[in-house]
Amino acid sequence: MPTSSPFTSAPTDLLLVVDVQPDFMPGGALPVPEGDAVLPVINRLMPRFGNIVATQDWHPADHASFASQHPGKAPFETVTLSYGEQVLWPDHCVQGTPGAALHPALETRGIQMILRKGVRRAIDSYSAFRENDRRTATGLHGYLQARGITRLFIAGLARGYCTDFSAEDAAELGYAVVLIEDACRGITPEATAEGTRRLRAKGVRFLRSDALAG
């Protein structure tokens, strides 16, 4: 995609904005370093897309992925749940709380659908397409199929987890996938590097926003 002329998305393109919520920003319950830096980048990109979906982490207060629900366990330790290994997190994005809202600085007028994930107490959901049992579908694939979407551009939080699992699942489902590098941030450099390795193996393309913003 040349940078010499403005990018205009095709009717079959969609911008997927992942978990741009205050709890993932500096000062939030589960802060991603420089997480707030994605906001101006995503806002600049949104007018280029006719199709936009946003996701929200939307957990019940007693969600099984919270370390607070496992006596003796601390955040970032792991446990084995019914579907396998699960990282334990600080309580975050609890349904109805300010930290779970879409960030107030995010431009929302172009968003056609908001997908809430992680809503079931017993199972976490990193991907916008499948919950962490890797079997339970969120419904996003059907939504995109009904609208003829064939290519996804992914932005948001956080690399290594929700952006990367969403991109990986999208590629496995047959979509062309572009991850917008400067419109994402990661929890740790190690998680980001491992996510990049997985995504490149799936054929995901990596671009910076200046290739799209014109």
Image: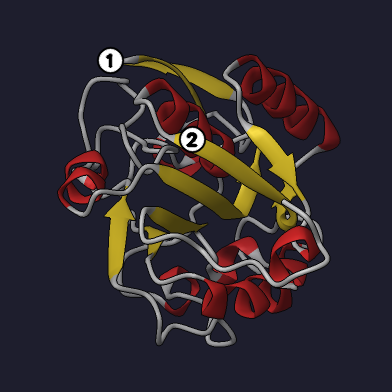
Can see residue 2?
yes
Report the colour scheme: secondary structure
Q: Position of residue 6 (x, y in %)?
A: 70, 72
The kind of secondary structure element at disc 1 is: loop
Q: Which residue is mark 1?
A: 82
Q: Residue at x 77, y 59 (%)?
A: 211
Q: Residue at x 50, y 59 (%)?
A: 19
Can see residue 27?
no
Q: Is residue 37 above or below residue 197?
A: below
Q: Position of residue 177 (x, y in %)?
A: 53, 38
The kind of secondary structure element at disc 2 is: strand
Q: Give the mark nearest the N terminus, 2 or 1.
A: 1
In this rendered view, identify the residue nearer to me: 153 or 106.
153
Q: Is residue 198 above or below residue 160?
A: above
User: Are there few (<14), some (14-19), or many (20+) residues within 10 Å of tag 1?
Assistant: few
Q: Residue at x 56, y 43 (%)?
A: 163
Q: CA distance from mark 2 to mark 1?
A: 32 Å
Q: Residue at x 46, y 56 (%)?
A: 16
Q: Position of residue 198 (x, y in %)?
A: 64, 19
Left or right of 5, for residue 112:
left
Q: Quadrant of residue 51?
A: bottom left
Q: Is residue 213 above or below residue 119?
A: below
In this rendered view, identify the residue nearer to me: 5 or 177.
5
- The circle on residue 176 is 2
Left or right of 58, for residue 91:
right
